């Protein structure tokens, strides 16, 4: 059996165990409304995780996605932007996200700045810009069409979940069925070999960060509709949640190997754990400790798997 399939089946097993614990400890866990709550809670961080998966498979890291999402939500919800209507708000959020991603990509690919430093600088800058534009106030969304994204349901399922699913499907096709995806794996596995094979490594690396910014822009509209606000406080620590989901999904931090399905299962595992803690009235600190233990265990498992693979 392929190792990625086995790892994904392992995550499905973890989800099943969490569901059994949920059914045993909370009467409302197995209800339809709670399942939809888990899926809705997964949607925003899930979209960001899709972008993070591309970047990490390509051998990089993006610490800025949470605050880029906050900046995009603030810029899209200013009174002037909202005066042009909902489509301009969506376009604004996407362009802000892609613009920040492009700056990250150019700094890393052409400026040879270490990804950790470049994206950390973008995180701080985006936070400052978001606070400056919003004057540290939450901006109320007055466009009903944007608010309806979170409240409207198709066949009983929130539209946010459909958007999440659409981004995952498109991301999976691009990663697994296109030249762009194959080049992403090649660069993450061995950038020099990819360059010798004719891949424009710098341009492709920059494009990966634009993809990450695009996902942050889409997530900005989703969280603005969910909270009916644009705020500089949105997205705090989302980058760590996304990276954690990618890691436990089996994507190597060194790049070159990983699956989008695994990353999404990682998101669902974390969201289900959070849901279990909320239903059982357990403290947030315990929840964070549990997440930390899971991340460390996943990284240790990866290291062990890598050593075993290199020996064989």
Image (spheres, rainbow, N blue to C red):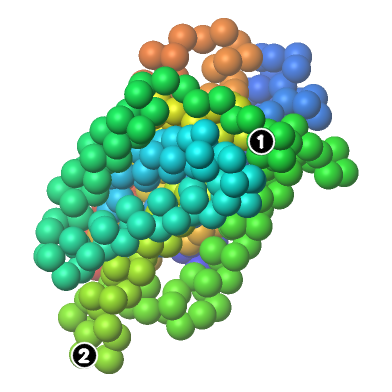
Disc 1 secondary structure class: loop
Viewed as shown, does residue 102 lie left or right of 49? left
Q: CA distance from mark 1 to mark 2?
A: 51 Å
Quarter-of-image position of residue 169? bottom right
Write the residue at 36% across / 57% down. Answer: 99
Residue 196 circle label: 2
Viewed as shown, does residue 182 lie left or right of 203? right
- In the rendered view, would you say 283 is above or below 164? above
Q: Are marks 1 and 2 in contact (CB under 8 Å)?
A: no
- In the rendered view, would you say 297 is above or below 182? above
Closer to the camera in the image, 170 or 81: 81
Of pointers 1 and 2, the one earlier in the residue sequence: 1
Please state, as top left, top right, bottom left or bottom right, where the C terminus lies in the image: bottom left
Residue 81 lies, in percent from the top left, at: 52, 42
10 Å crowding of disc 2: few (<14), some (14-19), many (20+): few
Closer to the camera in the image, 30 or 149: 149
Viewed as shown, does residue 218 lie left or right of 252? right
Quarter-of-image position of residue 152? top right
- In the rendered view, would you say 199 is above or below 216? below
Residue 79 circle label: none
The residue that label 1 is drawn on is 143
Residue 197 lies, in percent from the top left, at: 27, 91
For the question of whether residue 44 can be seen, the reply is no
């Amino acid at each position: 059996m392929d190792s990625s399939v086995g790892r994904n089946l392992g995550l499905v097993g973890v989800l099943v165990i969490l569901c059994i614990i949920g059914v045993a400890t909370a009467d409302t866990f197995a209800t339809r409304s709670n399942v939809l709550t888990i899926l809705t809670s997964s949607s925003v961080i899930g979209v960001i995780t899709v972008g993070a998966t591309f970047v990490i498979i390509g051998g990089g890291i993006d610490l800025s996605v949470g605050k880029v999402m906050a900046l995009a939500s603030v810029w899209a919800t200013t009174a002037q932007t909202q005066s042009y209507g909902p489509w301009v708000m969506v376009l604004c959020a996407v362009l802000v996200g892609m613009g920040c991603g492009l700056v990250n990509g150019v700094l890393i690919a052409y400026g040879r700045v270490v990804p950790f430093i470049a994206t950390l600088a973008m995180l701080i800058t985006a936070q400052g810009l978001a606070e400056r534009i919003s004057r540290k106030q939450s901006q109320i969304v007055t466009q009903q069409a944007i608010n309806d994204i979170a409240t409207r349901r198709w066949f009983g399922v929130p539209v946010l979940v459909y958007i999440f699913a659409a981004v995952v499907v498109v991301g999976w096709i691009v990663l697994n069925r296109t030249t762009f995806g194959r080049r992403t794996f090649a660069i993450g596995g061995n950038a020099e070999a990819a360059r010798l094979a004719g891949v424009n490594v710098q341009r492709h690396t920059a494009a990966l960060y634009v993809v990450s910014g695009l996902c942050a822009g889409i997530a900005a509209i989703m969280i603005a509709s969910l909270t009916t606000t644009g705020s500089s406080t949105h997205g705090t620590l989302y980058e760590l949640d996304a990276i954690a989901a990618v890691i436990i999904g089996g994507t190597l931090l060194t790049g070159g190997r990983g699956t989008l399905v695994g990353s999404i299962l990682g998101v669902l595992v974390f969201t289900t754990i959070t849901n279990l803690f909320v239903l059982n009235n357990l403290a947030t600190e315990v929840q964070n400790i549990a997440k930390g233990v899971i991340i460390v265990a996943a990284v240790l498992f990866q290291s062990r798997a890598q050593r075993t693979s290199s020996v064989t």
